[in-house]
Amino acid sequence: MPEQKLRILQVLRAPVGGLFRHVLDLTTGLAARGHEIGIVVDSLSADALTERKLAPIAELATLGIHRLPMPRVAGAGDVTTPFRIRSLATNLRIDVLHGHGAKGGVNARLGRLASKRAALYTPHGGTLHFGPGSMSGKVFRSIERALLPLTDAVIFESAFARGAYRSTIAQPRCPDPVVHNGLASPEFEPVTPDADAADFLFVGELRDLKGVHILLEAFSRLRRPDGSLPTLLLVGDGPDRSRYAEMVSALSLAERVTIPGAQVARTTFPRGQCMVVPSLAESLPYIVLEAAAAGLPVIATDVGGVKEIFGPTSSSLVPASDVSALQAAMQAFLDRPAEARAEARERLEFIAPRFSLDAMTEAIESLYHQAIATR
């Protein structure tokens, strides 16, 4: 007997970053399986950019996109929005509430009160991003513990995130599986570098947490085997962009480093021969997964769940915040590019069966049905 088609409400605060990428991909996969999806996002941060980001999901969200107040920190919306979500879920005859991120998770689980709806939660870092001494972190961790009895499953995108949650918050009594982010089939098609591709490519937010300052320092020390100077393309935008531009000038790199602004990641892949991801902290970064799926050589730091993507090639990861180690890895690519490309092929063989959109969607769909069956 085929399983029932579900009516699902995905709840998140802001359509940004890897969290929104995950919700978009999940909605795509679930809609293709015949489920009906609604989206709840924050109304307080709505602007023209937000609306553009939501456009790709609008056609898939047959139950509508609903905007309710979800303040970034504390606010009146924290009191009213869960009740409005509960009312919305009743009117839409929702079977499953799935919260994403700290605020989405709170609202989805409180929104299921006094009902038999299933409620699942994916932290996406969320409360794990707060430092141990942070007052906000202490408050959110207390809320997390209080909400666990209202949670049918906590879904983690990496084993790293699950371990951090268990050690800093609690061991959930409900299922808490790891379901890795997945990519669609076209994203596994190989990318060939352009003839004038830069030696190195960075794609991401321009801020210190992403290790851009470490990258620039390491890059300034490199030489190609023939003695010529390599090139770097820094794709992205962020709060530290102007400071990095100043750093480029101070290191006399202006003719070799290009900063074109934010662009769609995959469209930039042909413009670089090797992706560099020098982050100081991550959970399971999409950019590493996307670059590996495209067959690009990747130099990355050993943070968060990156080694879960690198698999049998994890020994090549470098320590975070270590300029010399990053320099050595980048120099090795310049000196022995064939070895790096062979490693990239091995990495692709590892991730292809493990990080597909179909596998991700099927695993989460199964959790929805399990949660409903136990209500």
Image: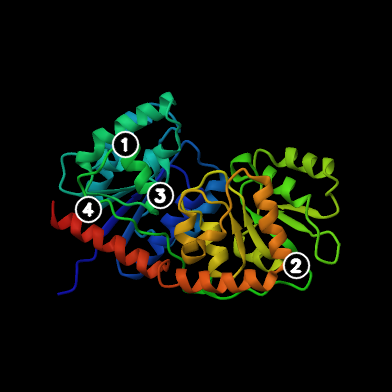
Q: Are marks 2 and 3 in contact (CB under 8 Å)?
A: no
**Mark drawn on residue 302:** none
Label 1, secondary structure: give it.
loop
Q: Amino acid at mark 2?
A: Ala
Q: Position of residue 322 (x, y in %)?
A: 63, 45
Label 3, secondary structure: give it.
helix
Q: Amino acid at mark 1?
A: Ile
Q: CA distance from mark 1 to mark 4?
A: 32 Å
Q: Position of residue 100 (x, y in %)?
A: 37, 47
Q: Quadrant of residue 107?
A: top left
Select label 1 or label 2 by which is in front: 1
Q: CA distance from mark 2 to mark 4?
A: 52 Å
- The residue beneath circle 2 is 197
Sequence-first tag of 3 and 4: 4
Q: CA distance from mark 2 to mark 3?
A: 34 Å
- The residue beneath circle 3 is 160
Sequence-first tag of 1 and 2: 1
Q: CA distance from mark 3 to mark 4?
A: 35 Å
Is the residue marked by circle 4 packed among few (<14), some (14-19), or many (20+) residues within 10 Å?
some
Of residue 354 and residue 188, the one placed in the foreground of this image is 354
